[in-house]
Amino acid sequence: MGASIPKGILMVGPPGTGKTLLARAVAGEAKVPFLSISGSDFVEMFVGVGAARVRDTFEQARKLAPCIIFIDEIDAVGRQRGAGLGGGNDEREQTLNSLLVEMDGFDGQAGVIVIAATNRADVLDAALLRPGRFDRQVFVDLPDLRGREAVLTVHAKRFQMAPSVDLLRIARITTGMSGADLANLLNEAALHAGRRNRDKVEMCDVEEARDKIAHGRERRKGADQEDLRKTAYHEAGHALVQAVLDDGTLPVHKVTIIPRGRALGMAMFMPTKDSFGSSKTWLTRFICTAMAGRVGERVITGDISSGASQDIKQATRMARQMVCDWGMSDLGPISYNENSDTVFLGREISRTQGHSDETARRIDVAVAQIVNEQFAMAEKIIAEHGEAHRKIAEALLEHETLDGIHIMEILKTGAIQTPVVGSPVANPIREATPAGPVPETGTQSSPSPA
């Protein structure tokens, strides 16, 4: 019919999603030679070396044809020309020009297909992306729920897994993780099991590995009893409000007052399915849950602290996106975040404000209204369920960590019915220290829909 196969394929996606592995798999299935090179290998301090390496690579490919050339991290050499403000880009631009010439197809390179990978397609030169060079763009996204379960199934074969390990449950609590992240998660879990002198990886090892990767190691020393009490009521506020507002799509997974990283505690929620968009109702619930920590803390102390700083940042950022990006306010369906691309990428050399000072003031008012309304809603929920809030906090002080089922039992029956399984690591005695500034408390929810 006269059609020709694509000469170039650009794979775009976040790090760790398997772009390089996919390229190798293509070469293996095609049973042809595979030439792999990184984009940074073309960039040298000596003039002309990069362009020469491009020509040498394509010359070798012609001799081996049919074959596949794979260029990893092509943004190192294919960045848009003219984006820099200095004169240090001449060598890189010469290398890019050489690559463009080689991919034009005028030198009889039949049988040579170029596959490139990047996680920054937005900074690539337009000439590199035109038809005749990279004819196809394949987006390699982060795995969804079923994809994560499949990836975990493959990697789990390397380890001795206990029957208690539920790969689907692990997939649900690892939203946003890439294939490489999941492989590392199971490896960390195996290392943790080894430190406990176990011969099989158990579910508690996976939970500990996930928390360590996401939030850092445990810090069981350094918090006095007053700080622990504040943290317990803070995290109980998050958990209670989320449990009340949840419609079944984001139940409470776990609440803990064990310090990790900079956080004295955290509440974690487990999505039951992957979501590719968020409604206004979901977003306002997110903000309400974020503000519930400060409300819960104020209930017991009558004061507020800096511990809610991260929650406030998350809530404010979400509210501003609702107003400026998604048109979810009385200002109407209008986008106010114009020219927000990163500068110095050849897109915008300066930033401009696309609205008046009066509109900016109205935006600030709308953002404050959303946050304050949800703060008031959190106050109302915690006031209506004050006894449950107190019992959750007291249970946290006793057990340090509660599962979502315990939160729901307290909310529905007023007491924990299911036995609380303690941490597999021995709990050393906490050393009391003089009270000081309260570090941030953490709230782990589903990824921001931004």
Image: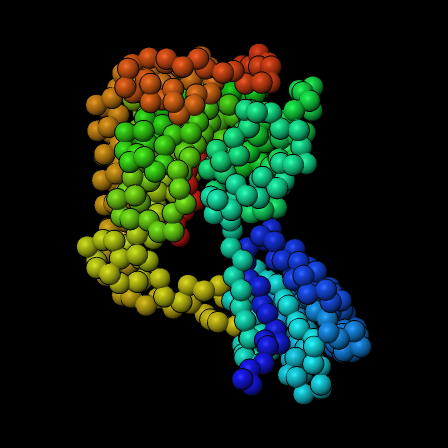
Q: Position of residue 174 (x, y in %)?
A: 50, 39
Quarter placement of the N terminus = bottom right
Q: Quadrant of residue 298?
A: top left
Res. 365 in view: yes
Q: Nearer the viewer, residue 403 or 140?
A: 140
Q: Is residue 332 above or below residue 298?
A: below
Res. 97 in view: no
Q: Quadrant of residue 246?
A: top left
Q: Is residue 317 above or below residue 309?
A: below
Q: Residue at x 23, y 34 (%)?
A: 377
Q: Residue at x 58, y 46 (%)?
A: 179
Q: Position of residue 194 (x, y in %)?
A: 69, 24
Looking at the image, which residue sits at the far front? 1
Q: Quadrant of residue 135?
A: bottom right
Q: Nearer the viewer, residue 89 or 178?
A: 178
Q: Residue at x 66, y 73 (%)?
A: 113
Q: Is residue 130 left or right of residue 411?
A: right
Q: Residue at x 41, y 21 (%)?
A: 232
Q: Position of residue 61 (x, y in %)?
A: 76, 74
Q: Position of residue 286 (x, y in %)?
A: 33, 40
